Image: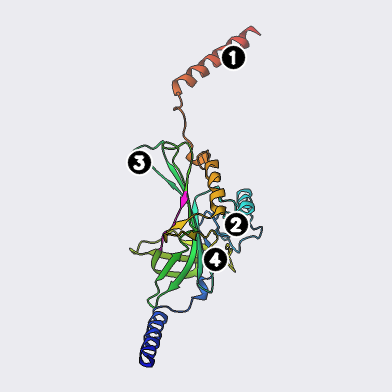
Amino acid sequence: MFHSLRTAFLTGAAFATIATAQTVPVNPQLVGTWSTKSHQVFTGPRALTVPLNRPTRPTTAVVPTVSWLTHQLQGFYDPVNEKMFEPSHTGFSYSFTADGFYEEAYYRAISNPTSPRCPQGLMQWQHGTYAQAPNGSLQLTPFGVDGRQLLSNPCAYESAVYTRYNQSEHFTRYTVYTDPYHNVLRLDMYRFDGSPLNPMYIAYSPPQMLPTQTLNPTSASGTGGAKATGKTKSKRGLFEQYHEPMNKKVLGRRNEPVNADKWWWIGVGMTAIGGVGYFCF
């Protein structure tokens, strides 16, 4: 029995050593909240603090816009009320902590080449843990039950579709450096296939994030599956509140094309009436 315990202990220690060897300490340069150039999509809760920098030309004054302040008042995702708030522009944001947690927020507009009048809008949020390998790659593992996705497809559905979202991510490498044009810290990340994400710029340090733990846990059922808690069931009715397409100004559809001939004849008529009035009066 002693021999078995000793063998089990040594085996566990070996696995722990291997697991430790496969990761390296977090790079302090990665810690913070990063956002793309639109600077309208941020992770974290409601906030009123001004970001560290905005990617503008060096000669341009850094002045918060009304749309940016609106976003900061409402945030991106509210886990308590199960709501997602649409930014004024598309973009995405990542946040990383020094102890291995991350959060991400995406807002995309998806074109439809076969039917240009039917674009889609997509909002995605998730958070979890991350680890860096010795080769410099990053592995992001979300808390599976917490991720959320809101899809707006006005040509297919009258209401936006609100669902769970769970997608692990692997980045082969990343670089942090001072952008030579904007003179702010920039983060470049490369997907599993080597393709780059759009560059992100530092927005907050320390990072702005929701609590780094499971926010909407589910309980295990008697058969070993998962079932919704009473809190989750009570929120399910809120999913039906998203009745309008996301960002109607960006994704809205024109009911009919402008009739140029109609407006031309209206102009001719108004010009004729004006000429008659000039000679008569």
Q: Residue at x 42, y 70 (%)?
A: 138
Q: Depth-wise, is mark 4 or mark 1 nearer the camera?
A: 4
Mark 1 burial class by Cα count in 10 Å: few <14, some 14-19, many 20+: few
**Front residue of this view, candidates 127 and 236:** 236
Q: How was this image coloured?
A: rainbow
Task: Give the CA distance from mark 2 to mark 4.
Answer: 39 Å
- Determine the secondary structure under disc 2: loop
Which comes before the other along the chain, label 4 or label 1? 4
What number is the disc on residue 213? 4
Q: Amino acid at mark 4?
A: Gln
**Front residue of this view, candidates 68 and 266:** 68
Secondary structure that dominates the magenta span: loop
Q: Magenta segment range?
A: 163-168
Asked if disc 1 and disc 3 are in contact, CB closer than 8 Å, the reply is: no
Q: Depth-wise, is mark 1 or mark 3 nearer the camera?
A: 3
Task: Give the CA distance from mark 3 to mark 4.
Answer: 40 Å
Q: Amino acid at mark 3?
A: Pro
Q: Depth-wise, is mark 2 or mark 4 nearer the camera?
A: 4
Which residue lies under the disc numbered 3? Answer: 113
What number is the disc on residue 66? none
Q: Is residue 154 above or below residue 101?
A: above
Which comes before the other along the chain, label 1 or label 3? 3
Please provide percent x and percent y for residue 37. Answer: 51, 56
Task: Give the CA distance from mark 4 to mark 1.
Answer: 71 Å
Q: Residue at x 64, y 49 (%)?
A: 66
Please provide percent x and percent y for residue 89. Answer: 52, 49
Which residue lies under the disc numbered 2? Answer: 60
Task: Give the CA distance from mark 1 to mark 2.
Answer: 47 Å
